[in-house]
Image (spheres, rainbow, N blue to C red):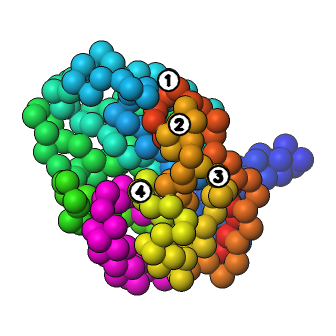
Amino acid sequence: MLRRTILKIASSLFTTAFVLLLTPGANAADDGDPIKLRILTYNIQIGRAPGGSYSDPTAAHLDKTANVIKTAAPDVAGLQEVDCKTERSGVSVDQLGELSRETGLIGTFAPKIKLPGGDYGVGTLSKIAPIQARFVHMQGSSHTRVLQILEFERFVFFNTHLPLSQEKRLAAVAVIEEEAKKYEKPIILVGDLNAEPDSQEIQELDKNWKSLGPDVPTFPSPEPTIRIDYIFLRNAESFNVLETEVIPDPETSDHRPVFCVVEFK
C-alpha cells in the first residue's frame, strides 16, 4: 500500500513537472512581477580596434569583441556597426553569427546598406528569441540608417545608430517616437546616437524616455571625451537601476560599451 502511494505521488510530481516544462511562460515571472534585465549597448566598429584598417578583413578581432560581451553577461545586447559577409570583413564572415556562436546568445540582424559582398547594419544578441522582429529605415546624412525593433513577451527592444548631422538625427528621433507609440509594453532603446546629452535630439528623447546609463563619456575609447552611447527606458510603471557603467575597455572598439542592470514593470 505504502509503495503504491509513493509511486502515485512520484508519478503525479513527474506529470506536473512535464506539463510545466511544456507550458509557455510557466516558469517565467507573472506579468505583474518586475522584470530584471542586464542590458548592453556596444558600437563594435566591425570588430576593429581604434585605428584598425577597414579594408583588411584580418584586422577584425571578433574574439575580443565576444569576450567583452561574455564578461558583461547581458540578457540583451544591441550592437552597432556590424558587417555581414562584406568584402572588407570577409565574404564568408557573418559577424553577428560569429558573435552569437561565441557568446551562446541568439542573433538578430537588421541591414541598413548594401556593401560589396554583403550588408552593413546593426544586430541584437539575446538570451531568448524575439516573438517578432522588424526594422525601419531612416534617412542619414551619408547613408541610410536603421531602427531595429524586437518584441519580446514583456518588453520591446529598439536598437539604432543615428546619423552624423543634427537635422537627420532630429528626423530619426521623430521616427523613433512614432514607432514607440505603437507599443504599450515597456521599451528599451539603445544605440550610438551621435549626440551629446545637452543636444536638442537627446532633450527630445528625455521628454518620454528615462536614461539608464551613467553620464560618463563613451567616445573615443582610448580617452573618451564625449557621451554618445545610451540606454533608455519608456512605458515602465516603475523602474530601479541596480547597476550601470561605461565598461573601461580602451582597445576593442573606438566606442566603450555601456551596461546596466535594471528592474522595471
SS type, badge 3: loop
Category of crowding for the residue at label 4, using alpha-carbon neighbours closer than 10 angstroms: few (below 14), some (14–19), many (at least 20): many
Please give the name of the residue rendered at 53% of the width and 36% of the height, measured from the top-left corner: 221
Amino acid type, residue under disc 3 in the picture: Val
Left or right: 253 with respect to 30? left
Precedes in sequence: disc 3 or disc 1: 1
Give the CA distance from mark 1 to mark 2.
15 Å
Asked if the magenta segment contains residue 174, the reply would be: yes
Amino acid type, residue under disc 4 in the picture: Asn
Q: Does residue 238 appear in the picture of this structure?
A: yes
Category of crowding for the residue at label 2, using alpha-carbon neighbours closer than 10 angstroms: few (below 14), some (14–19), many (at least 20): many
Amino acid type, residue under disc 1 in the picture: Lys
Residue 237 percent coordinates (x, y): 66, 82
Residue lying at the far top in this picture: please name it.
58
Please give the name of the residue rendered at 55% of the width and 54% of the height, measured from the top-left corner: 227
Q: Residue 221: which numbered mark, if any? A: 2
Residue 201 percent coordinates (x, y): 43, 72
Label 4 belongs to which residue? 194
Precedes in sequence: disc 3 or disc 2: 3
